[in-house]
Amino acid sequence: FAKLFKDEMTLDNLPRGQLVAMCKYMGIPNFGSDALLRFQLRNRLRQLKKDDRDIFWEGIDTLTDDELRSASRARGMRASGLSREALQKQLSEWIELSMT
């Protein structure tokens, strides 16, 4: 997901409706100017990318169940009703895509 926005010009070209939808999806307040929404989206994507790198280096096995759920929710993935193994698998796939 973060790779889609590696070129920050992509965010600059999104109309307001799409910016608002992206903010809602990512749990970011969706009010304010277009510039503010873009700023908040860029910050969230940077945070996720940094978190992805940290998880990659520390290992998914080191995360607690709560951390796995939180990381999954932050990336828009299902977080409830899954076993620890399923959470690890989906986050592992995300990290693999994020790091390539």
Image: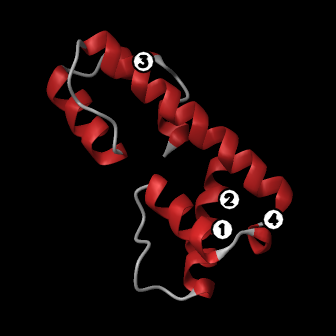
Going from the N terminus, do you reach mark 4 or mark 1 first?
4
Q: CA distance from mark 1 to mark 3?
A: 28 Å
Q: Nearer the viewer, mark 4 or mark 1?
A: 4
- Please say if 21 is above or below 64: above
Residue at 32% across / 21% down in the picture? 37
Q: Is residue 72 above or below residue 9?
A: below
Locate residue 41, reporting x and y percent. 41, 29
Q: Which residue is mark 2?
A: 96
Q: Position of residue 18 (x, y in %)?
A: 21, 31
The residue pinned by badge 4 equals 59
Q: Which residue corresponds to mark 1?
A: 92
User: Mark 3 belongs to which amino acid?
Assistant: Phe
Q: CA distance from mark 2 to mark 3?
A: 26 Å
Of the residues shown, which amino acid type is indicated by label 4? Answer: Gly
Q: Disc number at residue 39?
A: 3
Q: Are marks 2 and 3 in contact (CB under 8 Å)?
A: no
Q: Nearer the viewer, mark 4 or mark 2?
A: 4
Q: Estimate the spatial distance between the alpha carbons at disc 1 and disc 2, rounded to whole Å.
A: 6 Å
Asked if the residue under mark 2 is in contact with the one under mark 1, i.e. CB atoms within 8 Å, the reply is yes
Residue at 79% over, 70% down: 62
